[in-house]
Image: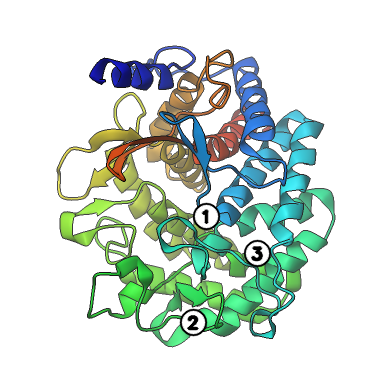
Amino acid sequence: MKAKLFSLLLISCVCVGCVLNAQVVKQPTKVELIKALDECTSYATKVLLDEEGKSRCDYNVIEGKWYPYEEPWHTGQVILGLLEAYKVTGNKDALAAARRAGDWWISLEIKDNPRFAGMVAATHGDDIGNDQIVFATTSDGTPGIFELSRVTGDQKYAKVATSASKWLLENMYYPEEGVCYDLADLKTGEVLTQNSPFYKNKKDQKLEDVSRPNTEGSPFKDAYEFSKDEKFRDAHILLSNSLIEKQDKDGIWMRYMPNHMEVSSFHPRFNLWYAESLLEAYELTKDKKYLEAAAKTARTYAKAQQKDGTIYYVNYTDGKPSDKGSICGSAVAFAGILWIRLAGYGYDEFIPYYERSINWVLKNRYAIDHPDPNLRGAVVNTRYRSKKGKVWLTSRDVGTSFGLRFIAAYYQLKYNK
């Protein structure tokens, strides 16, 4: 059994070039970047998106089976990655797949329940089931939907995303505390303000357990730019100010899940989303306090990055070494996106880190002739857990979604000046 498991793990990590070894940082060529974009695009269009157009999400390498997980945001991120690749390569398959996925996303609009009029059924799935609409499951998917309207000129996508954002603003926004509630019951329409199913075993739940600043995806900023409704702009700025107020010395929002204050561990992407939203606040206001706050987050992720460019899933702010059980290619790419943007604002300290990231992403992809067709061309993003009494090793779609965005951003930086 041990020998078989080892073989499976080994096969799952066969990538183009050397795998996770110390790498010489060099600037990739146009050819290398386009090749990577084409291969990741092929994977996203042919494997990640199912016949309905939604992301298949998590691939259990050991079982050879896909599992859904927060499909609205995962699909929205695939869309965004494909659109960024399309801008560089002009690959019409990428655009067609993005539209197909966008059509699935807007089909989630709720039309048969007055309580949720204009909202989308962005349910979480996984451990809490499909009876709860989650704010971040919606908002993390909206960047791709708004971008789809920008790229295609078809306003139907942004209209639905704006309508959903309006519902979130009117029903889950709590400006007095600088947060938005996390969940609403799909059956009753009730916003959960007292108890969260994410903390099933916690009796005395506080505001921090049922709400967060929830700026992931910057839905209010995008909705403002589409609708010109100042309420959206005001909400994004207020929540961004709340982020700065609630940020700790490491640039992390440790009081909110999926960070874990009790063990000083932080999530590989969650804080990056908040930092990215702070950059959007800067774009709206030109107030440099938002850049400084985002840079604090970026520095903590720079510390978490290994010399070869790797970022692991579990990292700590208290000096403990990273847990090497799961390799988070999406964090390598997402941090790279943030570092590129900050360097563009004058934070040159981050240049070496995004250079490490681009080399890592290019070298740590599954080979296009990999024996498992469910992995061919994907950016490495593993998640190892023990679940239901067995080893649970997944390859996650987000490695490729964020990989596409990052490779495209790097290409634009270096070759489309």
Tell me if residue 284 comes above or below residue 294 in the rendering. below
Query: Which quarter of the rendering shows the C terminus?
Result: top right
The circle on residue 222 is 3
Q: Position of residue 272 (x, y in %)?
A: 42, 51
Q: Which of the colour schemes (rainbow, by chain, secondary structure, one colour) is used?
A: rainbow
Q: Mark 3 belongs to which amino acid? A: Asp
Mark 1 and mark 2 in contact? Answer it, CB < 8 Å: no
Tell me what residue is drawn at x 74 percent, y 29 percent: 89
Q: Nearer the viewer, residue 296 or 145?
A: 145
Q: Position of residue 264 (x, y in %)?
A: 19, 54
- Label 1 or label 2, whichever comes before in sequence order: 1
Q: Position of residue 324 (x, y in %)?
A: 25, 33
Nearer the camera: disc 3 or disc 2:
2
Query: Which secondary structure lies at badge 2?
Result: loop
Instruction: Decide if residue 262 is in sight here.
Output: yes
Badge 2 density bin: few <14, some 14–19, many ≥20, Cα 10 Å: some
The circle on residue 191 is 2
Q: Which residue is tagged 1?
A: 70
Q: Mark 2 belongs to which amino acid? A: Val
- Label 3 or label 2, whichever comes before in sequence order: 2
Q: Position of residue 233 (x, y in %)?
A: 61, 74
The answer to whether residue 167 is left or right of residue 375 is right
Q: Mark 1 belongs to which amino acid? A: Glu
Task: Name which quarter of the figure residue 154 lies in.
Answer: bottom right
**Residue extending furthest bottom?**
176
Tell me if residue 28 comes above or below residue 169 in the rendering. above
